[in-house]
Structure formats: C-alpha cells, structure tokens
Amino acid sequence: MYPLFFRLVFSRLAPERAHHLAVRWIRLVARVPVLRTFVAAALAPRHKELRTEALGLRLHSPFGLAAGFDKNALAIDGLAMLGFDHVEIGTVTGEPQPGNPRKRLFRLVQDRALINRMGFNNEGSAAVAARLAARTPVFRTVLGVNIGKTKVVPEEEAAADYVKSAERLAPHADYLVVNVSSPNTPGLRNLQATQALRPLLTAVREAADRAVTGRRVPLLVKIAPDLADEDVDAVADLAVELGLDGIIATNTTVAREGLGLRADPSVTAETGGLSGAPLKERSLEVLRRLHARVGDRVTLVGVGGIEDAEDAWRRILAGATLVQGYSAFIYQGPFWARGIHKGLAARLRSSPYATLADAVGADVRKHA
Ligand SMILES: Cc1cc2nc3c(=O)[nH]c(=O)nc-3n(C[C@H](O)[C@H](O)[C@H](O)COP(=O)(O)O)c2cc1C
C-alpha cells in the first residue's frame, strides 16, 4: 500500500516538504495514546532472538534509524513506535543554523537513492538539549546524539564547537557520535585526518566525562565512504588507540557510482551526498575493512544502502553489531523496520549461530 501512497502523494511533493509532512504525521500519531499503543504493538521489534548488547546498552534489536531524519529530536517516540530500536538524532551543531538554501534534497526513485546537501539545518545544541531535558519518553528506545561543526566556525576552532555540543547533549544521550563525514559542510571531512581527529575525539571524550557523572557515555565517530583505504585503516587504528567505543560506517558519498543508466543527469549533477542503494557495496567494503582491522575491540555500526533484512544480515556477518538506515525508509515507509526485524530473526534462526552476537563478523572468521 505504501508504494502506491508514495507514488500518489509523496512523489508529487518536493522531497523536503514530504519529509516535514511525514514527521508531522508521525508526531501526531505518537501523541494519541490509543493509536500509538496500537501502532507500536504492531511494529515494535519483539523477536527475542534479536535482543542484543552493544556499547554497554541493552537493545531489543540491532536495527535503528540513522542520523539526519530527526535532526532536532522532534519525533523520537514516533520513530520508536515505528519499530526503530535506536534513533540517532542530529546532526546537531554548537549554534543554530539554517543549512543550505533550498532545493537541497533530491530523489532518484529508479535508483532507490537520494542526494542531499542539507548542510546541518538544525536548531543548535542548546535548543535540542532543552527539548531532550523536557522530554518524558513514552517508548524505551536507545537514543544516539550525533554532533557536528557549525558552518561559520573555522576549522581550527572546530573542537570547541563540538565540545560545546557534547557538554550540552551528552547528559541526554545513550551514545554520542562525532560526525566528521558530511560532505555538505566545507572542510568538515578534513577532520577525519588523524592529526585533526585525535585532539577532537580526545576533547569530546573529556567534555562528555565532565558533563556526565555516574556513567560513561559511549563515544563513536562517523566516517565517509570516500576515505581512501589507508585512511579507513588510520581511523580504525586511532579508534583502538583512543579506546573509542565505536565507528559508524558510513555517511553519504560524493561519488556517483552505481547509478542506473536512466538516472536523471540533472539530478545526479546536484552537489551533495548520495545515499541509498548505490552506496551499498562501498559501505559494506568499508565495514569489512574496519572489522579486519579492529576485530571486536571497537563496536561497528553498519549504515549505507541497507534496504532489506538480507542487507542488514550481510552487515552483521561482516562485523556490524548495530545497523542503521535512512533512505530506504523514505521509499518503503512505516512497515520497513518491521520487515527488517522479521527477516533478520528468520535468518538468525536458520543460521548456524546461536545468538546475534555469534553472527557478528562471522564472515571474516569463516574466511580466516
Ligand atoms: C536527507 C539526509 C540527511 C542526512 N543528514 C545527516 C546528518 O545530519 N548527519 C549524519 O551523520 N548523517 C546524515 N545523513 C546520512 C545518513 O545518516 C546515512 O549515513 C546515509 O544516508 C547512508 O544511509 P542510507 O543509504 O540508509 O540512507 C543524512 C542522509 C540523508 C538522506
């Protein structure tokens, strides 16, 4: 039913307008107790075998919603209601900012892909922290908070901007993500170089520790699929060296590979990050590379082109403890997470692995 709805309604609206409409509907449904209980009962993950532990947290499932959908933490309960067991809000920056001028989000429907150059449009870490502080959660969901650099802050002062956000947001976060991989903030991806990344991650770690007593907020870094293989290795080594909790692989790509011949050249020529199906193979490759390097010393989160349970399962076998998605949610709609959970549980049951944890990285062990 959703594909028809998408064709008749969403695809006729500008992508960003469709997004805001969807967020509004999700929030609305989540505000009505009877409705949300009914929807959550139908869609929430309830396969016992998918229960897992990661980053010192207990989860109902390894599957969650990637950053960028709920930048301002407006719809966490609504998204949990739709079955996402963890929701990563953000990217949130130190200061509020409008992002790039519209149009800045484009669909490539045939390729099941998106191009975006949103540019971290968000209300800023003070406003988002206040919203999280005032929130009474309805559903139990793991909350990730993804932070990035304010555009007008020069690269040399980036750490202070991240630190400001970390201090404000870490108290509300189950885990914190340093995003250095969006292609839409000039210079941001330079922070992936280890000489910039080491002091940045150290400063954010210290800020989180200052801001939160009584527990250690897990810290992760999110990387681009466009890194050269040696740079992926360098980030992996740095993560081990710093005792980082996790790496999220990957963000969107500036490459335009893997698109069908019928892809509209006026859209593929748009500046921004490509996400969805064409990103699948490279994201998987980066994940494999990371896993080969860090083993089980660093938790890996697989994201990029995950469309169905088979994609999610392949990431787990390649070394991901958690998996996330965004673009396929736009194309597949509210039953997407449910289908992934069902398919994942079935795959695990018919696999030789007793638990999900046993399946993590099993591909690599098999070929070792
Ligand atoms: C419209 C849009 C906005 C995004 N915004 C962010 C963001 O603010 N921060 C971030 O770390 N990733 C952001 N992402 C990247 C996603 O979190 C994800 O890494 C990427 O889209 C690959 O996953 P997918 O192929 O399942 O979409 C965004 C993606 C899209 C499509």
Image: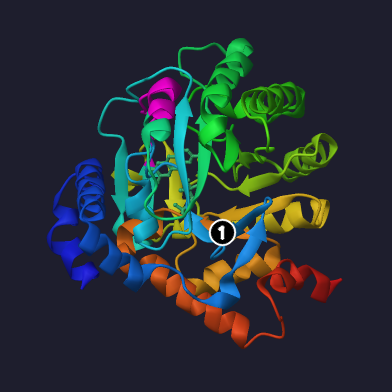
Residue 258 visible to an observer of this rendering: no
Residue under the image location 67 percent in, 22 percent down: 210
For the N terminus, which image quadrant?
bottom left
Q: Is residue 21 magenta?
A: no
The residues colored magenta run 116-130
The residue that label 1 is drawn on is 323
Residue under the image location 18 percent in, 55 percent down: 10
Q: Is residue 117 magenta?
A: yes
Image x and y of residue 250, in percent: 58, 48
Determine which quarter of the picture holds residue 48. Answer: bottom right
Residue 245 visible to an observer of this rendering: yes
Whether residue 103 sits left or right of residue 55 in the image: it is: left
Image x and y of residue 278, in percent: 47, 57
In the foreground, 339 or 205: 205
- When the figure is inspected, residue 302 is found, relative to residue 121, above or below; the finding is below
For the C terminus, which image quadrant?
bottom right
**Tag 1, which secondary structure?**
strand
In the foreground, 345 or 211: 211
Residue under the image location 52 percent in, 23 percent down: 168
Ligand 1 shows up in the quarter that is top left
| Badge 1 amino acid | Val
